[in-house]
Amino acid sequence: EARNVNVAAVQARETQKLTTKRILPWEALLAESVGLWDVHQLLDYWNHNNCIMTSKYNIITFLPVNLFEQFQEVANTYFLFLLILQLIPQISSLSWFTTIVPLVLVLSITAVKDATDDYVSVSLLSLSADLLLLSSSEPHGLCYIETAELDGYEFCRVLDLFDENTIENFEFDLVVCEPPNNKLDRFCGTLYWRECKYGLSNQNMLLRGCVLRNTESCYGLVIFAGPDTKLMQNSGRTKFKRTSIDRLMNTLVLWIFGFLVCMGVILAIGNAVWEREVGFLFQSYLPWDPPVDNFLFSAFLSFWSYVIILNTVVPISLYVSVEVIRLCHSYFINWDRRMFCNRSSTPAEARSTTLNEELGQVEYIFSDKTGTLTQNIMTFNKCSINGRAYGERHVYGQTEFNHHCFLTWNPLADRDFCFYDASLLEAVKVGEPAVHEFFRVLSLCHTVMSEEKSEGELVYKAQSPDEGALVTAARNFGFVFRSRTPSTITTQELGKAVTYTLLAILDFNNIRKRMSVIVRTPEGRIRLYCKGADTVLFERLHSCSHDVMNITSDHLNEYAGDGLRTLALAYRDLSEEQWAEWAERYRGADKAIDCREDRLAAAYEEIEQDLMLLGATAIEDKLQEGVAETIAILSLANIKIWVLTGDKQETAVNIGYSCKMLTDDTTEVFIVNGHTVQSVREDLRLVCHPFICPQIQFHAINASECILSFSLLLDCTKLLMYLFIVVFFLWQAHALEADMEQEFLETACACRAVICCRVTPLQKAMVVELVKRHKNAVTLAIGDGANDVSMIKTAHIGVGISGQEGIQAVLASDYSFSQFRFLQRLLLVHGRWSYLRMCRFLCYFFYKNFAFTMVHFWFGFFCGFSAQTVYDQYFITLYNIVYTSLPVLAMGIFDQDVPEQRSLEYPKLYEPGQLNLLFNKREFFICIAQGIYTSVVLFFIPYGVLSQATQSNGVPLADYQTFAVTTATALVIVVSVQISLDTGYWTAINHFFVWGSVGAYFTILFTMHSSVLFNIFPKQFHFLGKAALNTLAQPVVWLTIALATVICIAPVLAFRFLKLDLKPQLSDTVSHVPGLNCVWYNYTHLCVAVLLGNYHQGKLIKPCPQSY
């Protein structure tokens, strides 16, 4: 079948049209016969339709699916069970609406939230299938695509199979390919056409999510459609992350359920005893309701009745209130103007609403380097060519060399390019062969695309900033990359146009760590040009390059010490016979169906040997603004920062100094630099064992499985003040044994800072998982590239930097922003406040509900254990959703202990969250004890007073309705006064909710107890008309309420005043003792100055903003 596929995107201004064809069933059967697919995969594939649904719900399935998901929560199922019990008249003394109203309200709010999230998350993608690109309207079959939705880059892919003129007559024989999978960076297949085989790779695929750029039209063959597309295969459900408070709350809720069952059992036993000893005396005029025929069955029903009455110890509104608070905290992060980047117009974004309070408990931060700590804007800084170093910046007695020199000599030079060593340009001008060949490599060995917007105005589009910087450097030194086709590369060398025949491209990947091209020069010579990591290229050099290699290695070490990113360049001349033999093997590997990638890797390895070293490049990637200050402040907050980078060891150490993770204050340094497991362990024993970890026992393991190289910097005069490890990873992903993990972890966690270098993306995730598994600490991973995704997903909290390396890290993250320095505000302000607010919310919530519910328990001993409620049933229904819900929500959303500026000035304020001091099992039991104490006061004070009190006319006040109104009113006033004491930051909303809730209580109370409603609905409104008005008109009732309030609140006030006076916390000192603010402020800045190296010989090099 043929159909037109619309490839329009929001960013595109023109509509792209694609003609597609589908693989026939017999072709898929043939593919199965060669072992790529099995029968079940084939049938599943062919039975699929092409309908793509990125949403979880639709109009028909929303209600049943959402309700099914919500009732997966134990609490919702529990309250549904209570609702069913309330429908049994012999069990429930409460009307069914006391449970169904809160339950429906909670389910409705959650359903609206889920529907909104699902609607927002629907992806409107531009291309609904994965296409095999056949041809395009562009010359030479090029196709420019933007893959921002896949990885954030703009680059092109090249196809040289077909021409547009032949597309109308294109009739394929067979396409054999891999089954649907989620690997965006690879595709393996073979196309059979006109008795020829063509190997298919990822370079031939136009994936769903791509957008055509500068291409009028293209033609493609549909390979995967619908849910089989690679993008949809990558849209699997992300692992749900839960906070430590969530896990603790689940445990506490189970304990409360157990406590509820115990109370039900106690009251049921009391019912059995009372019915057996006393109740039988009333059988003549108060017989048991059928089917009760004995006291044991009465006790059984009484148990379930009390389970219904006492269920409010865990109110259903708890869960929805938590979600509302988290949602508001997420909006606060999104709306924070101080986390908005004006340069890129990028705001901070909370992509998850479930982890906000976890931001206030972070102990370990795992950070990428390039693009996260650095700007990822590369500049060509230095180079080494044939053993000579270039790029030293001369300032004294010489004018700095800048871009004006390039423009006068080379009209195609980039105006923004700067280089400060004029000798390199002179070497180009005089025609030094090695220098020319050096820049020729840079102009040819790459995948950059060139676009000429106007005469002489070139714009390069590169897959990485490194490639763009190197090609730009070659351009400014006279070797200008102009254009490319599938078979040629055109450059302009020193003003002369030169076209090279492109014979092969040996792709770069994280395993090879190098890239090569094979070209035929205009003179007819065949040459291989290679660039890559020095550790990889040096192993493949010809023996005659060893002298140059030794000199270049020294230069590379200097560059790494300066924090520069380095690459080595080399070449090899090939004879026609060598090329012909290798090309035949290469084509065979390229067309292979099985193990194609392994065969290609073997072919690449074969030809990339006996290379001649040309030199090395050094690219500068400057630190982002505020990185050093942010790391220093976070260190004062007792947060340990680990940097995980793929750079070499010297570069990693230099970054440690640049970021002020290391300073020059270390007076004595021990270096552990072993190349075998045994030597590393012996060095660690000598250096670390006496000071850090005497408990570590060293056990020998196979050295071939794990090779480590440690560099340990230790200040022995100040143990653990500056202890630093650089870990050099060379082990395979699954070669790490348990004992080695433990030794590494014990040593690393004793350090102030850790940098792991030469790590792969998988090893980044392994390091994070190691700390998560063995340390009871919250971890945060932050990165900006696709290679950081596994680390971000593994950590408790993932943060994505929206920078130069695409948006895959952002898409996989829980929070995102554009600058590393915003992490300080995310943790110390938003994280600390979220943790504080959630803890205060939970403490008060459990307190108020135990104070409310336990009154029923005490009343059971005075009502014959009959499951009679103390309060009016409407009060029970509205207590948690009207009278007390809004004040505690306001506190959970807006509360503060200190202003945001104080949170940044005093990083030590962050430590209570790390130690989990504000809400734990101990704090929970304190809240429960306070709630039980309040319930005792609220029951026995009114009971004792009203049992002896009379009205002014002599009528006794000892009746049920008067007691119920008095107790309920006292409860509302006590909990309102309590939340007024708990609230540390008052806003207009807090005042409105607290006092408005009290006013709403009296308004509803007088309405519900009015004579009008009682006369109209006597069965629904059981309290006599004007019961509330008559009760509250008695002065003794108000005196009782006042007495109960004082007895409940006075101990709380006394305890808090004593605690503030005898054992104040830092937050109390900051907020309540202004005279100490200056001292703490300057102490903090002094510590930061020491960490940043700005404190020398008792003097601050950079003075604090506030004087002593």
Image (spheres, rainbow, N blue to C red):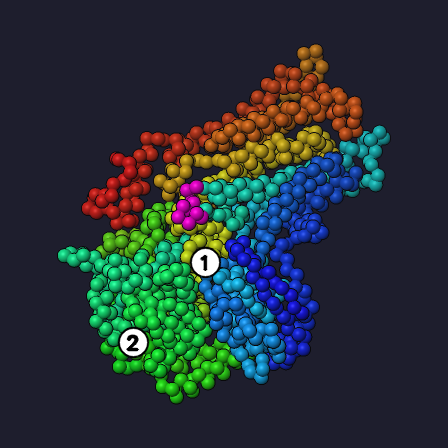
Relative depth, front residue between 702 and 200: 200
Residue 94 in picture, x, y percent from top left: 73, 35
Name the residue rendered at 33%, 34% in the picture: 1077
Q: Does the magenta segment cover residue 342?
A: yes
- Give the amino acid type for the residue marked by disc 2 in the picture: Leu
C-alpha gap between disc 2 and disc 1: 33 Å
Relative depth, front residue between 444 and 59: 444
Label 2 sits on a secondary structure element that is strand
Disc 2 target residue: 613
Q: Main secondary structure of the magenta part?
A: loop
Q: Is residue 536 left or right of residue 193?
A: left
Q: Is residue 84 left or right of residue 687?
A: right
- Which contiguous range is marked in magenta? 337-346
Occupied quadrant, residue 98? top right
The residue most toward the top is 953
Can residue 576 be seen in this snapshot?
yes
- Give the amino acid type for the residue marked by disc 1 in the picture: Gly
Residue 985 in picture, x, y percent from top left: 47, 32
Disc 1 target residue: 806
Q: Is residue 346 left or right of residue 693?
A: right
Give the class, few, some or many, for how many residues have Cα within 10 Å of label 2's Cα (few <14, many ≥20). Answer: many
Label 1 sits on a secondary structure element that is loop
Residue 360 in picture, x, y percent from top left: 45, 45
Q: Does the magenta segment cover residue 1054?
A: no
261 shown above or below 1: above
Occupied quadrant, residue 217? bottom right
Can residue 259 be seen in this snapshot?
no
